[in-house]
Amino acid sequence: MGCQAPPSKILQKQYMAKSYSRSGLRRDNNFSDLSNSVGGLNNLLNSLVDFQGSTFITQDLDAIRGLYASGVTSTTYRAFGGSRYQFTNSNGGLSEYLPRVTYQNRLDKLRIFSGEPILNGGNGLTAKYYNSDQVFENTSNVFSGSPFKIDNFWESGNFQYTGKITPEAVSVNGGVEWEGFFVPTSTGTYNFSVSSSACFTVDFETQGYVSGVGTYTERSRIGITTTFSASGNAGTNIITLTSVSNTQYIAIGQSVSNANITTGSKVKDFNRSTGVITLEPPTGISNAVSSLFTNQNVTFFKTIGQDTSITYSTYPLIEARKYRIKFRYFIPQNIDAVAVTRAITFGLSGPDISTGTLLRYTYLYSLDYDFSDASKGILSDFLTNSILTGGGTIGSGSLSSGYVRVNSSKKIDVTYQPKTSVPSITKSSVSSTITSGSDIISISDTSGIQIGNYVFGSGIPDNTVVKEIVINSFIIVSSNATSSATTVLTFIDHRGFVKRVVGSSSGTTFTLSSGDTSLLKSGMILIASGASAYTGIITTGSSSSLTISPSQTIGAGSTAYFYQSRGLINNGLAEYCLPSQTKCLFVSSNTNSGSTVIPVVDTSGITNGWTVLGFQFAANTTVSSFTANSITISIATTRNLVAGANFTVTSESGDRSLCCPPTDTSPPFNPTLEGLETVAAAPSLRVDSGDVKFDALTATVSAANIANISSTDSSTKRIPIQTPSGTFNILCS
């Protein structure tokens, strides 16, 4: 009796233990003051045990954590009906494959074909969850510390929170950060819309971003209260921010406060480019701005539960290219949000998406999504290596151990007419907006511009070409701009184009003041502003000058363009006919056969002892000596040489005559100014064996030229001529 506790204390202990066991973490008695919420949840779950000695704790729920609806609707289920895999049997009927071909079999095959879909095949953004004590509204990152949970829960971008943002959260407050990639399905400008009763931010990849820090540019940050300088006119609903950049903190639906603005006015609309904000006054009031004010502080504010929204328009995005994106949803600390609506909704519109469409997970990709080439399927490789109708590139510009072969069932039709003037090669010259580090050029008039055209202008690197055109909106080019500006760009015809330089000429010498002669070869043509006609070029080995013909007077600082003189250029001997070992010499005036001195245009780079090749020269002919404009050869020429003809000289062994193919004739003919002349040593026609076939044969013989034939004359040589009427013989003496 003396050791027994008072009845009141026994009852108190029993009551507390029983109450704790049954109540646990129920909403009406959630023990929010407990220091260990996990212990409270374990106590609640343990009351559900059916067998004595068993336990039920939070870890037992790990198997189902992170599960969420995958978006399959009843309509999707009905689409499975009648989709079993069948084939036509020998009797003409349909039979099912045995063993059955399952959806998994077919999905595996599709995966090989399409790979990890990088276009409209996303898995949702990576979501990171934070508790209320980790939210710091006025810091750049909003959240502090490590997230207590990470998943990629995203379906259609419509989040309605009736309780916590995730079951593991301490309370209904806190926040979530979604981050990953957006991949557009068409090239163009996209619009992201965000509407929320809480606070939020929107970040999108900085235009021209490549790697390193500064991935994002913050597009919107909507908090509880922000104050900025603005001006307003009396009797209107318009105010203008002093700093346009502050529009990123403005949202439709925010309340607005200033002594000269009617209480209860809200933001109705705003312009990110001008900083102009349209206000909506309270019901019954015509104008929100009651008095004129200039550069005064205006406060924009909201409460949790008050809906606000923004729309962000991206710069032009390229189809199938990934772009970093980040959204944040949060409720600041020390705000009671239990009894208010908590939601955030994301919308998307673009070139192929109508306005009002929710932002589905298929456009969004988690931070760890596999975009590597190894994850791409057969179809992706096919599209990457296809030549589109606008043109393309075959193979690599660098040395390769393999070859790229192009097969065609039709002939290769090379239609190329060399241009003759700067206006004929200029496709367009138009004002454009470029952004440093970006390959997208905004342009309001794309008339005349073609895929493949070269682009020239301030801030555009050399050898930049047009890759894609969105009519009267923008173009995508092969290189990123080096500056940001609105400037006039010139688009030049790419067919046959070699390079552009700046220089001048006097007579037959063109001197470069900007650029060099690399890539230039004799036989190309030069087109320059101010020139009266296009001219052919002959390289001299100099990096700053070349010879032109006919002569031209081109003023200093003129832009010159070099083009191929013919449509099909064969560089198959480029590595065999190296300029340091083989030269093409051009004859400057007519030279008869039997000559040992040959006048040429230029002898730069040759040496005594080099072999002279061509059908006009005897075997083993070499250069004995040379001047600037002639060479002396060891053996006299065997054929005539006419002005403009070319031949090969080389320091290497082997037949390199094809390095400089003859441009006048082919042996056994002799070139003359009147045309081709058969050499005396070559017969006109010889048939050793075989048939000579004619579509028609007419022989006209004058009787005066026929000699008398006697009975003693004979011939053993005949040429048989087969005709539909029989075989006739021509007697040969």
Image (spheres, rainbow, N blue to C red):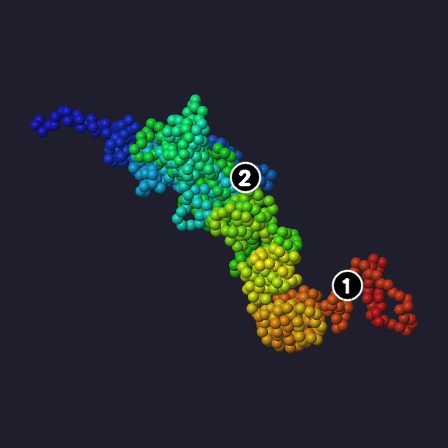
- The nearer-to-camera label among 1 and 2 is 1
Quadrant the C terminus occupies: bottom right
Q: Position of residue 486 (x, y in %)?
A: 51, 46
Q: Position of residue 285 (x, y in %)?
A: 43, 23
- Secondary element type, mark 2: strand
Q: Position of residue 398 (x, y in %)?
A: 52, 59
Q: Residue at x 52, y 48 (%)?
A: 487
In the rendered image, which quarter is residue 499 located in?
A: bottom right
**In the rendered structure, which amino acid carries the disc numbered 1?**
Val
Label 1 vs 2, first from the N-terminus: 2
**Disc 1 to disc 2, C-alpha distance:** 63 Å
Q: Is residue 84 visible?
A: no
Please rate how many residues cluster around mark 2, counting C-alpha atoms within 10 Å: few if below 14, some from 14 to 19, many from 20: some
Compared to residue 417, the image places residue 49 above or below, namely: above
Identify residue for label 2: 86
- Please name whichever residue, 38 or 173, is drawn nearer the observer in this view of the structure: 173
Identify residue for label 1: 692
Compared to residue 46, the image places residue 631 above or below, namely: below
The residue positioned farthest toward the top in the image shown? 284
Q: Position of residue 526 (x, y in %)?
A: 62, 59
Q: Is residue 26 left or right of residue 556?
A: left
**In the rendered structure, which amino acid carries the disc numbered 2?**
Gln
Quadrant the N terminus occupies: top left
Q: Is residue 730 left or right of residue 408?
A: right
- Please name whichever residue, 50 or 328, is drawn nearer the observer in this view of the structure: 328
Q: Residue at x 53, y 51 (%)?
A: 457
